[in-house]
Amino acid sequence: MLTSTKSLIAYNKKNLDDKTLLSLYKNMLKPRMIEEKMLILLRQGKISKWFSGIGQEAISVGVTMALDKEEYILPMHRNLGVFTTREIPLYRLFSQWQGKANGFTKGRDRSFHFGTQEFNLVGMISHLGPQLGVADGIALASVLKNKQQVTAVFTGEGGTSEGDFHEALNVASVWQLPVLFCVENNGYGLSTPTSEQYNCKDIADRGKGYGMESFILDGNNILEVYAKIKKLADSVRKRPRPILIEFKTFRMRGHEEASGTKYVPKKLMNDWAKKDPVDNFRAYLMELGLLTEKDDTTFRETILNEINEHLQLAYNEDAIVPNVETELNDIYSDFQYKESTPSAKTEELRFIDAISQGLKQSMEKHNDLVIMGQDVAEYGGVFKITEGFVDAFGKERVRNTPICESAIVEAAMGLSIAGMKAVMEMQFADFATSGFNPIVNYLAKSHYRWSQQADVVIRMPCGGGVAAGPFHSQTNEAWFTKTPGLKVVYPAFPYDAKGLLATAIEEPNPVLFFEHKALYRSIRQEVPVNYFTIPLGKAALLKEGTDVTIITYGAGVHWALETLEKNPNINADLIDLRSLQPIDTEAIYASVKKTGRAIILQEDSLFGGIASDISSLIMENCFEQLDAPVKRVASMETPIPFIGQLEEQYMAKGRFEEALVALLNY
Ligand SMILES: Cc1ncc(C[n+]2csc(CCOP(=O)(O)OP(=O)(O)O)c2C)c(N)n1
Ligand SMILES: [Mg+2]
């Protein structure tokens, strides 16, 4: 602690009243004292490591105090001061760190990796960058709902090297979203100094490139932080726009507590120690005559008592008892499926028109539903699914996006956090790779981690047979079916596509909705004209027979139908799975137990596809009834090629008939 009473930071209190000045001080003191206590506990082996915010408290506290409590903040791993300033009861934080039930994640995630709607805080996922785009989504919701609120999101300077940072700032600027992007430049990202992290003088300079205002603030000066952020927040509430703020500060402890700071030059450490935000402000308040040694001692005693009392509460709390059912139940948000019955009146629609009509009717039904994607607005999307939607629903709800799949998945998540619904169109399913991280790590895990639903549907135009080569033909459902927390739907007919899409949108959980491009304009069917739903996880038995069970989905359904038409002597059950996650195992087992033979047809290449899992499930559950080994038929173990002859050779379709006949003759 600084012993001199002379402050070395140039404070200017302007017209701030005494009460505010003192609460700024007390709010900085609290996280500092919690961490000092934790250091003792760490040395005693009573707690595990954490990421220290010592020396950076002025940023967390200044920003949080400058915002209204209803406004969302998305803090990082060093922002204990955000959580304490939002007045989360300390025992809940301590329980969170000890993995107890009074925490926020039921022991499922650690440290600051949680959010809480109660306090309008959305914590990070480990990957650092994704929350920047989530902030965009929350801010978009506040614009759409005309709430005049600002959202603040934090990142370290290391995190600014991630693509998420670029994407999120760009989207926020193009859409003029009320986000304060707060970069805490503390000199290091783990052991990496700024000179090895980026090659420009100030990160704030990047604001210009994104077309947004930016500022550099002394992150150790609580008055500068508080006053400036308050002013900016006021202004942004009135005139929504993003602002980039670089806080110059320093990381006074190791990357994580206990990992040391050997690689940091001593002089740098000593220079920054003199700029300690708590000690200097204390000295300043004393210079002003607002704080006496005695007051300070009283403040500290009060805080220490609170810490000790709450630590005891957390220690006294029972440990979580693992329960398989509880864990499985929390993967998804509860959803009571409501049947909307199909009308008797039908019209003949192509697959593509059924999807378009279904989506349109969902837009009419859900006023809080927003569609986002590349070229989806006036252009109507590359497949024209959203043609005419702008006229019907306006550009606010049918949003063209820059080319940035990650940021848009993240923004969709942000909309969901703010209570809205989102449908994102991947221009091609192949491009989901560019948004893969937020899909499998943010959307999929959010409900399990902190009970936050991800009410997002991602439409995935997929599949081959259209001579479009390796990057416009993949059917990549297996990347998602293996990730707990996601739902995967894959219809083969216009009727199913329309009804399942409606349910997927009603579902509060993240759904990957696969639409096979080759079916878009080739498959027609009579489809009810009204809004109707079909439950997810129910297969359709398209043909009934006794000799073999064919299990497939998507284009595979049509290949199987063709094969059966060509071979009327084959007496088969044909199961169209329709959804892959959840999957209708009941329908599969019932059929296989009847026929004794199973063949699974999948368009994707073989290894690691869903056919393998279905095969294992059959083996494990129907072994006694099997008369032959389960057969998988899939495409070649190569990327999907461009020219017709190669694509035909690649595709599972050409090998299905022979395999089916062989299985029947086994
Ligand atoms: C995608 C990803 N890569 C690497 C890491 C490991 N990691 C966690 S924090 C961190 C340093 C972050 O530096 P910075 O953004 O400057 O924040 P600071 O820790 O300095 O506050 C690293 C490399 C990670 N969590 N996620
Ligand atoms: Mg850093």
Image (cartoon, grey):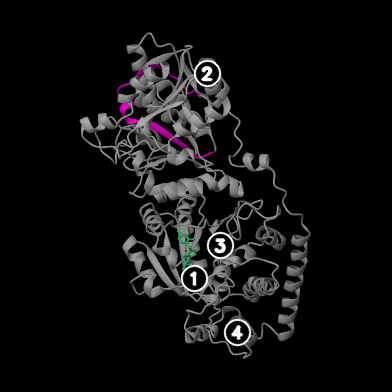
**Which residue is located at x 56 percent, y 43 percent?**
453
The answer to whether residue 635 is seen in the rendering is yes
Instruction: Check the picture and name the quadrant holding the N terminus.
Output: bottom right
Picture layout, residue 457 above or below residue 296: above
Q: Could you say which is closer to the camera, residue 629 or residue 90?
A: 629
> Residue lying furthest top in this view?
569
- The residue sitting at 35% across, 12% down in the picture is 565
> Reading the chain from its start, which is encountered first: label 4 or label 2?
4
Q: Which residue is mark 2?
A: 591
Q: Secondary structure at mark 3?
A: loop
Helix, strand or loop at label 4? It is: helix
Name the image quarter holding residue 39.
bottom right
- Marks 2 and 3, the one that precedes in the sequence: 3
Which badge, 1 or 2, comes first in the chain's sequence? Answer: 1
Reply yes or no: does residue 520 show up in magenta: yes
The residue where tag 4 is placed is 284
Span shown in magenta: 509-533
Tell me which numbered mark, 1 or 4, is placed earlier along the sequence.
1
Which residue type does callout 1 highlight?
Answer: Lys
Disc 3 target residue: 67
Q: Residue at x 61, y 61 (%)?
A: 111
Q: 585 or 80: nearer the eye?
A: 585
Relative to the observer, which residue lies in front, 389 or 52?
52
Residue 414 in view in this figure:
no
